[in-house]
Image (cartoon, helix red, strand yellow):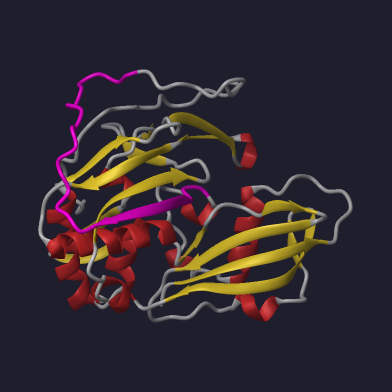
Amino acid sequence: MPRRWTAILRDLADTARPIRPEDCHGLLNRWWPQPPEEHAAAKRWSMNGWPVPLGDHLYHWTLTWLDDDVPPPVDPVDLVGEPQRIGDHLLEPLSVTRTFDHTYEQVLTAPRGPSVLRSAEVRSRTPVVMTTRDASGERIPHIWPHPRRLFGAVHRSGGGIVGGSGAVGAVARFAPPDLAEHWLDLVLEGLAQVRRSPLQGQDLRLAEHRHAENRTVLGWQGGFVLDLVGGDRGHADAFAALLELLELAGAGKYTAQGFGSLRVDTVTSDRFATGVPVARARRSPHRVARPAGSRRPAEPRSHAVAEAEEFGGTLFD
């Protein structure tokens, strides 16, 4: 079942380099190893950002296990009091609290109460990395989110689901198949009626993050509002479940490395939501603001694409 833990850790090292994403990824690969034949496949876990300093050698960290049937090989709760090496740091878990523990069946089918959820504010907590491949096979970073990329993708072959990523991919890979097929079809219908609008004071912007081997990862940060402007109660409930999974699974390509952590604040209403104006798709990329003081990396990198577009695709690749 999807599980989430919040850990408070004490750093036993007096001096050390800053904690890096690859250090955290290495620790979780040791906790929750993946078979060699699945090395290139999506992880069963999501690292929701990296350890955040709280002061006095204390850190806060959040982790999610996405598999519905197979429990994690190591439960972080069992590691309290046992120091864990993360890069140059030796972090001792002081407390581990399980903050989410529901099956996919509960998430996808549980009654949502009398109020209808049709709107949510989404804010990034870390850079969100989204890529697609161009005609030559090169990965192109996308820094303008829309529902198709935000909620992930489901991969099908021969009429059956063979994999996926993100929130919908977690359902496709780990939820009961008979439940997943129906729910994904419902979500596909509902997402065609999801609109994105600006969130005051949370402008979308280009983000650069130093990754392993001095590589720079391009992504976006900021926030926006998602509104479901049509559909029936079934679509609204599916939208609510999708937003819950979005915060659990994260968004984008490198969620196992800590990128793509999001905060989702939902708004319920007893009334049918009115339509939200949507910007027309543009053929040419437009400029995205760069954070003040950011530096361009020394090495060449592929160009980033920022496009304003409404949802017009399919979740199934």
Q: Residue at x 78, y 70 (%)?
A: 83
Q: Report the label total.
A: 0
218 or 76: nearer the eye? 76
- Hey, which residue is sitting farthest front in the picture? 270
The quarter of the picture where the N terminus appears is bottom left
Where residue 29 appears, as percent x and y from the top left, is 59, 64
Q: Position of residue 70 (x, y in %)?
A: 43, 80
Residue 299 sits in quarter: top right
Up the image or down, 44 lies above or below 118; here it is below
- Picture quadrant of residue 313: top left
In x, y percent, where is residue 286?
32, 19
Side of 284 where 78 appears, left or right: right
Q: Is residue 165 visible in the rendered structure shown here?
A: no
The residue depicted at 29 percent of the width and 74 percent of the height is 175
Q: Residue at x 87, y 49 (%)?
A: 15
Q: Verify whether residue 276 appears in magenta.
A: yes
Percent x, y for residue 254?
47, 49
Magenta part of the protein: which range? 259-286
Main SS type for the magenta part? loop
